[in-house]
Image: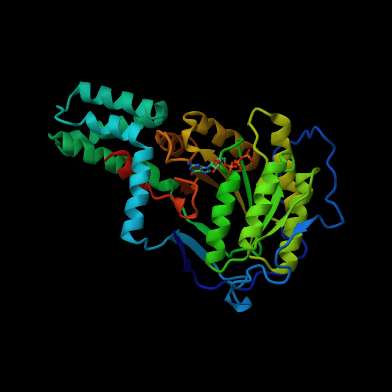
Amino acid sequence: MFSFFRRKPKEPAPAPQEPIAPAPEPAPEPIAEPVAEPIASPLPVHDPVPDALIPSQAADDVASETEEVVLVPAETPPEVKKSWMSRLKAGLSKTSTNLTTLFVGAKIDDELYEELESALLMADAGVEATEQLLNSLKRRVKEQKLTEAAQVKSALRSLMIELLTPLQKPLVLGREQPLVMMIAGVNGAGKTTTIGKLANHLQAHRQSVLLAAGDTFRAAAREQLVAWGERNNVTVISQESGDPAAVAFDAVNSAKARKTNVVMVDTAGRLPTQLHLMDELKKIQRVIGKAMPLAPHEILLVIDGNTGQNALAQVKAFDDALGLTGLVITKLDGTAKGGVLAAIAKIRPVPVYFIGIGEKIEDLQPFNAEEFVDALLS
Ligand SMILES: Nc1nc2c(ncn2[C@@H]2O[C@H](COP(=O)(O)OP(=O)(O)OP(=O)(O)O)[C@@H](O)[C@H]2O)c(=O)[nH]1
């Protein structure tokens, strides 16, 4: 579960007025379709509770617009934590089995290092991160005069934590009103599920939420988000077909008018190789910036943890196109190898805000480097 750590209150955010800086303008933009201006008339709003986004809470129970909060792991009850860790371990068991067995009764010699190299490469850590880990490990073994395999394993643990810790970063809320988050990723990565889980956690912690069903291609995706909104009393802005940028634009304006804390903009799944669809994402980003200068404030890429090395290619491509601010790695309860986080840390260290280990609300957790490495090495 999450909880919010309250930071000192900030000065009230300036009322939305003239842009204080140009809206973020991503790289060149040969847009296949002519860019339609954001629509003037409001889009259909699936608003279960027009006057109160969180009817279960009193109006003054909703976080103030300017209060800055950090989404951090809460004190999870030990039994929940245990079950969560054991599922993460089970999901990563392919890699952990390979990594741990090689230390059993091993001598510290070239053969051990070679086996470790193969295990890391097979775990999708990539050549660069594997090389860095091996070189650092050999150095540490020498410097600290380590003689036991268990000591080497423990040194590897420290080095992996060092490598992955820069990816560990909390999502800071409340610094903008609304905080606009755009969520992108390839088809089926878990974007909509992640939005649903996140929205639920945000609500539970006094943040009002508005969703934009920016997947205007797939009716089922839109319905999935609308149904989720109805179940949880969250307003969803959607449109049957047409321009996802217009949906996002309308959602941000609506959130500004309602003083909503967080807007999450879902987008249709796409491959980085589908250049016209990548251009469409840039357009959504740009149009959001027209509704609110400097928005979107968070651009998250959702990655299926079972994707392997291709995950790094996805991070690079989406980062180049949009300037990612964070990652969510889902489905680590499946057959994920997990090593790709090392590759991401080495090559394109975009923070990993959350990891998903199942389909339930509590199965989305903030990324913790130490826990992750422990799941990989035990
Ligand atoms: N096991 C497991 N399944 C997950 C997780 N996250 C999402 N899923 C499942 O993955 C499938 C796809 O999730 P969606 O949220 O629809 O993915 P999406 O990225 O929005 O899909 P598109 O809109 O088609 O691009 C669904 O069956 C989810 O229940 C996770 O952490 N673990």
Q: Which of 3 and 141 is in front in this view?
A: 3
Q: How many labels does the image show?
A: 0
Say if residue 150 shows up in the picture.
yes
Q: Residue at the spot x=56%, y=38% of the render?
A: 189
Q: In this view, does 343 lie above or below 117?
A: below
Spot occupied by residue 289 in the image (x, y as percentages of width and height): 73, 52
Q: Residue furthest right?
A: 40
Q: Residue at the spot x=71%, y=39% of the render?
A: 218
Q: Quadrant of ligand 1?
A: top right
Q: Residue at the spot x=32%, y=57% of the render?
A: 79
Which quadrant of the rendered structure holds the N terminus? bottom left
Spot occupied by residue 144 in the image (x, y as percentages of width and height): 17, 39
Which quadrant of the rendered structure holds the C terminus? top left
Q: In this view, does 283 lie above or below 277?
A: below
In the rendered structure, the answer to whether residue 70 lies left or right of residue 33 reads left
Spot occupied by residue 36 in the image (x, y as percentages of width and height): 85, 44
In the rendered structure, the answer to whether residue 190 lies left or right of residue 154 reads right
